[in-house]
Amino acid sequence: ENRTQKAEHMNTKQTEIGEIPEDWEVVKLGDLLKPSIRKESLSSNEYVSFIGMQDVSENAELINQNPMLFSDVKKGLTSFIRNDVLVAKITPCFENGKGCYTENLKTEVGVGSTEFHVLRANDLADGKFVYFWTVQQSFREILTQEMVGSAGHKRVPFSSIQKFQIPLPSLPEQTAIATVLSDTDRLLTTLRALIGKKRAVKTAAMQQLLSGRLRLPGFATNGSLKNSELGEIPEDWEVVKLGEVAEVKSGGTPSTSNKDFWDGEIAWCTPTDITALKGGKYLMQTSRNITKSGLQYSAAELLPVDSIVMTSRATIGECAIAKIPVTTNQGFKNFICFDKVDSEFIYYLLGMQKKRFVALCAGSTFLEININQVRNFQVALPKSKSEQTAIAQTLSDMDSEIAALEARAAKLAHIKQGLMQNLLTGKIRVNNEAA
């Protein structure tokens, strides 16, 4: 059911905002809005939904609302009703896309931050159509130039929103456009919810499998447990120090004043490179490289492929598996796993130790874990390398599934941006039957 079609065979006309369909007109956004919104009169025992700036996302979605008695509401807050459009007026919230459409308001009336503009469609417009214009990149970019006020407190005036020009189709076509884009949004929301569930399942699986509370088929013995320094563990597991399963190494930074040490062939990892992975497992590249001289005349050490790098300063316990030979700065403790253990298993096992690592640094103003603490750090693991590999494979399969879903969501979000741009400007028309 293809509900859209390219507009190339339709008649168009040239306007001050570019080429638009012949049966559309150029209007100011203010022509589609009620010029003033009266405050709703409520009794003190009625409930309203409070929406703060933190309750709307940068995808312009309503992610939270707090019901409260009208008598508890501070005076002077912004008031709105269902099917209003909220747009953040202050920097950087406006540029970042904060706002929402209030169709899912839990109460008749809502109140919110004074940093929201409220846009209420009049009889010429579909409220959701107006909303999709406010999430358009061009809307945000153009109006950012109109901001007034001192640095850090700049705001978009309501009058600038009112003067913003858009191409306008008939009311039925506005509704049809809004419906197509809403359907795409619903699909994205469903996909993001599924990703959230899969993440929760993986976290639970990690807790169970990496503690031995859940055994994979073929590895569960008689189920008997034994006491250990780390509490009860399966009979065929053991408690070891990290220094017994891997060679633990630190990192270093070559002198930044010596140009001969930099921009060479050797990858050099900083915590920013780990952050850029956004939870991904494999380190494939780094933003900076060092030379052989840089390696030779610094504390940096070259780690082989499949080493595990782990942040050990400020943010502690963020890990990745190096898929290239790599060096790191001093904000890492790194593991070259011995043959008797599965490096992917150790990667997942380390990921479960963050709280214990941080607890070792308690009392320090600048959190850091030293190399001896890491070498002597105790973990429980299966004696059988094949069980370690099976656990790692199970968790890896879950990671792959989550990554595939995230790629689908990113692709759909990208498609939606293009679709929105084309539908709102009439380059693609909704099929007449749909309208």
Image (cartoon, rainbow, N blue to C red):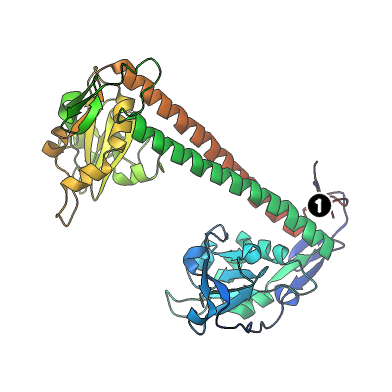
Of 309 and 392, the residue lying toward us: 392
Percent x, y of residue 98 = 54, 64
Quadrant in which residue 127 is drawn: bottom right
Quadrant in which residue 378 is drawn: top left
Res 133 visible: yes
Of 213 and 158, the residue lying toward us: 213
In the figure, is residue 168 to the left or right of 394?
right
Q: Quadrant of the C terminus?
A: bottom right
Which residue is situated farthest in the left direction here? 372
Percent x, y of residue 368 = 18, 48
Percent x, y of residue 83 = 68, 68
Q: Residue at x 23, y 30 (%)?
A: 232
Residue 412 in the image: above or below residue 234: below
How many C-alpha atoms fall within 10 Å of the one at disc 1: few (<14), some, or many (≥20)? Answer: many
Question: Type of residue at label 1?
Answer: Val
In the figure, is residue 263 to the left or right of 164?
left
Q: Quadrant of the N terminus?
A: top right
Residue 154 in the image: above or below residue 367: below
In the figure, is residue 241 to the left or right of 138?
left
Res 414 visible: no
Q: Residue at x 63, y 60 (%)?
A: 136
Q: Which residue is mark 1?
A: 430
In the figure, is residue 178 to the left or right of 247?
right
Percent x, y of residue 54 = 47, 65
Q: Secondary structure at mark 1?
A: strand
Q: Residue at x 60, y 70 (%)?
A: 86
Of 433 and 253, the residue lying toward us: 433
Q: Residue at x 77, y 69 (%)?
A: 125
Of 188 and 144, the residue lying toward us: 188
Residue 171 in the image: above or below residue 260: below
